Image: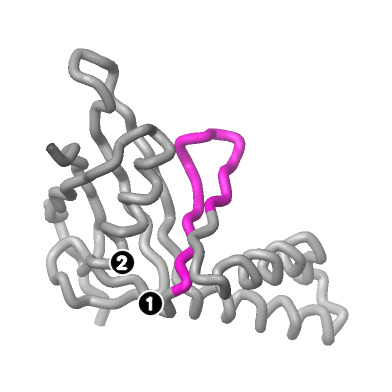
Amino acid sequence: MPKKIIVESSSYLAIYKDYKTPWEDVWLTTTVKPGRKKLKLAPCLIGRKSLEDDLLWEKKFKNEDNDLFSQEEYDHCKNVLKIINKEEYFYHYFNDKNILDIYSPKDYIDREEAEKMIGELMKKYLVDSVKCKWKRPGIFIQSA
């Protein structure tokens, strides 16, 4: 039986299945085992296009000898791109293990890809099958 994951998002991805975005912040809530404390994760789902754009900015900053250039960020982008070019997901954890970036080999993230990425992440918590329940935002602000 698939494990139910509550997925919260404040963008169109929570409303429209076909909406595509270069990256998406989501908040996940579930319990891994009955009676256990809730597991809360806050991954940023990132598509290849967003990563390539970051790499272009870093190259531009490097060529301009700009203070915004970061060799560490440049190397990180290049290494992640090598991995996702092999059609694999890449996980980058921060100090708080519940906050992470997940990189996709797909150019953009739609709901189907987001659910695949969430499913792969949950395998790290020994959950083989997931069912995502998307929670619509209470307030949605659309830019002009």
Mark nearer the viewer, 1 or 2: 2
Does 48 sit left or right of 19 as displayed?
Answer: right
Q: Which mark is residue 97?
A: none
In front: 126, or 97?
126
Question: Residue 54 location in percent, x, y?
Answer: 61, 75
Quick one: SS at disc 1? loop
Tell me which residue sits at (63%, 65%) in the image.
80
Q: Is residue 125 above or below residue 134?
A: above
Q: If you read the primary sequence from the N terminus, does the residue marked by circle 1 or circle 2 appear first?
A: 1
Does 82 sit left or right of 8 as displayed?
Answer: right
Q: CA distance from mark 1 to mark 2?
A: 8 Å
In front: 34, or 13?
34
Q: Is residue 92 above or below residue 98?
A: below
Name of the residue lying farthest toward the right: 65
Which stretch appears magenta?
91-105
Residue type at tag 1: Tyr
Residue type at tag 2: Glu
Question: Residue 10 location in percent, x, y?
Answer: 25, 58
Are the residues at dot 1 and dot 2 in contact (C-beta closer than 8 Å)? yes
State the quadrant of the N terminus.
top left
Asked if the magenta segment contains residue 76, the reply would be: no
Question: Residue 97 location in percent, x, y?
Answer: 52, 34
Tell me which residue sits at (26%, 15%) in the image.
36
Q: Which mark is residue 113?
A: 2
The residue to which callout 1 is attached is 108
Q: How is the image coloured?
A: one colour
